[in-house]
Image (cartoon, grey):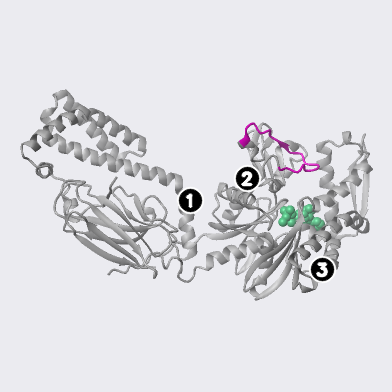
Amino acid sequence: MVLLDIFDPKAPPRPIGIDLGTTNSIVAHMRDERPVALTTCDGTALLPSVVYYGDHGNVLVGASAKSYASLHPERTLASVKRFMGRGADDLETTRLAAHRLAPATTPDEAKVVRFDVGGRTVTPVEVSAEILKSLKQSALDQLGTVGGAVITVPAYFDDAQRQATKDAGRLAGLEVLRLLNEPTAAALAYGLDKRQNGLFAVYDLGGGTFDITLLRLEDGVFQVKSTGGDSALGGDDMDRRIAEEMLDAMGASEAAARTPEIVALVLGAARSAKHGLTDALEVTVELPKRGGGTIVYGIRRPHFDELIEPLLERTGRACRRALRDAGMEPSELDGVILVGGSTRVPRVRSFVEETFGKVPLADIDPDLVVAYGAAVQAQLLADSSDEVLLLDVLPLSLGVETMGGGVDKVLPRNTTIPAGARSTFTTYADNQTGFEIHVVQGERELAKDCRSLARFTLKGIPPMPAGMARLEITFHVDENNLLKIEAKELTTGVCQEIEVKPSYGLTDDQVEAMLLDALDHGEEDFEARRLADAKVEGSRMALATQKALAADADLLSADERARVEAALSELRRAVQGATHVGSVQRCIDALDDATHEWAGRRMNRAIQSAIGGRSVEAIGESVAHARGVEAHLLEHGALPVKES
Ligand code: ADP
Ligand code: MG
């Protein structure tokens, strides 16, 4: 029995948490056991969830994209989260929104919302991916490496919306470890999971959406008891209330005066005024007047509170409904958490207190609290692996290296254990008396990129022509996570067995890192594997042709022989040095072509000689000696070749 020591892990990539918001997005990570927001490309923690598509294929994200909203409203996309996982049919028309929808020309296209951005069509998933890409880049710049990501979604997101969010993550090159409900993330950020049990309300008023969620914590696990809200209610509505007043004051009451450019400008001014009112009791703004000149618009906090009261009432109704749905009284709540930039508004805070009869938790920045919780969760996922994994499924595939450096996956990842599987191989060279068996673990296509678990040699196979020996490798993983490998040469019964303790000792984040790695390299791996396989096929064919030349060259005319030899040396060169599978394949085809007729003649001769009493083995043996197959293959054994 061989127990192998485990290789040193490479430094694990850093997990990140992402709040992919309707209005703003944030990326955070854990530093010294505390969540910290990373600086985005805008130089702030908050990245506006806005994407601008320029006319030369250039894409801008964040504040720079937002600055185009008034100049090129049709090329600037905001609030696309509303469209995630939605079909063109189930759209609510978004008031005062500038984006244009691309008409669907096929039923398939109608299944997804598509935006027309200056002649180019993009889907919400693609737009979200641009935002995620930007956040990932910021994280990379600051952390060096980025591991998996936890991305948050509203608790009410359905399967299609969640899938769309995952797709956006993948499209951005992120390994999405998990989607996490936003309210749960907020509760995690407050460390509420450290309590044993509790009942919490999460009041999330963002830019364009309001969500109320009632969570029950039971033995450290959060359960959504009920959700409610309004997908068209948020800080933007407050902006609109102020903007209406501003437009009136500017003399732009009628629709004709409200061009997208003016609307975008006034909405921006209204938002600044609203933000100002969070800290000050009064704010004044200078605005252009219709027909020239400027006006000064002033607003005081009590008036603003009045303007937004109907909006708050709507949130109150949703809260009461959610309580009713969960069968709970406000008095039963252990805490109320404020989430979303709009809960900064003083009147919102007092309103929540009135509604639930409780002073809400608001110590953590309501803009960042969801991203913080995502970072906490991402780190938890990475850490839960410090101990040895006790899994009932294989975390990574187990396989055998084959000739050429590829991997034959005997037991694929996620197989439930205990499990067993076998795979059959054959010899590469004539008279090969041993197999070198290399057991690897991982998802990559080439053995050198996987983790090496064991190497052993199966010896004592009698000399046979290439392809005659039959090596059967059986993997068995028992309930104790022990991997037992049996290698048996079937024609002779020569057999060897070893035991390995595989992954076990690999931490979750190492497993994730390996999966991420496989994902990152998927395409190049596939190419490398095809090249490696083509080279093996090429060299087997070259050996076979060499063998045939030694035995049956007399069946060729001088011209034919020259052609075969030229094609053979071309193929050898390709096997040695080619970097593209195509060039190896072309040489294989050329040699196949050159030897085609000759093969027919050889077949006839073989049949005749068989009738004449010579055995195929005898031919093989004499040819091998004549040619002198690489001596080390005979002595040490070669990697197995997958039997097709
Ligand atoms: P989302 O979850 O939709 O991405 P956020 O949680 O980032 O939204 O909230 C954005 C909203 O918060 C915007 O309407 C913004 O105007 C509002 N907001 C941000 N800061 C303040 C502030 N200081 N006072 C009032 N509203 C604010
Ligand atoms: Mg939010």
CA separation in Å, label 2 and label 1? 19 Å
Label disc, if present, on residue 519 of the rendered structure: 1
Can residue 179 be seen here? yes
Q: What element carries label 1?
A: helix
Can residue 191 be seen here? no
Foreground pick, 30 / 168: 168
Residue for point 45% across, 66% down: 392
Few, some or many C-alpha atoms within 10 Å of disc 2 (few <14, some 14-19, many ≥20)? many
Image location of residue 150, percent across then percent down: 59, 58
Quadrant of residue 569 within the rendered picture: top left
CA separation in Å, label 3 and label 2? 37 Å
Position of the N terminus, as image quadrant, is bottom left
Q: What residue type is labelled 2?
A: Val
Could you tell whether 342 is left or right of 165 in the image? right
Position of the C terminus, as image quadrant, is top left
Q: Mark 2 points at which residue?
A: 125
Decide if ligand 1 comes within 8 Å of the CB at mark 1.
no
Which tag is nearer the camera, tag 1 or tag 3?
A: 3
Foreground pick, 629 / 268: 629
Image location of residue 587, percent across then percent down: 29, 33
CA separation in Å, label 1 and label 3? 47 Å
| Pointer 3 with pointer 2, Cβ within 8 A | no
Examine the structure image and report whether residue 613 is included in the region drawn in magenta: no
Against 145, residue 115 (above or below) is above
Q: Quadrant of ligand 2?
A: bottom right
Few, some or many C-alpha atoms within 10 Å of disc 3 (few <14, some 14-19, many ≥20)? many
Q: Mark 3 points at which residue?
A: 356
Q: Is mark 2 on a helix, strand or loop?
A: helix
Against 8, residue 296 (above or below) is above
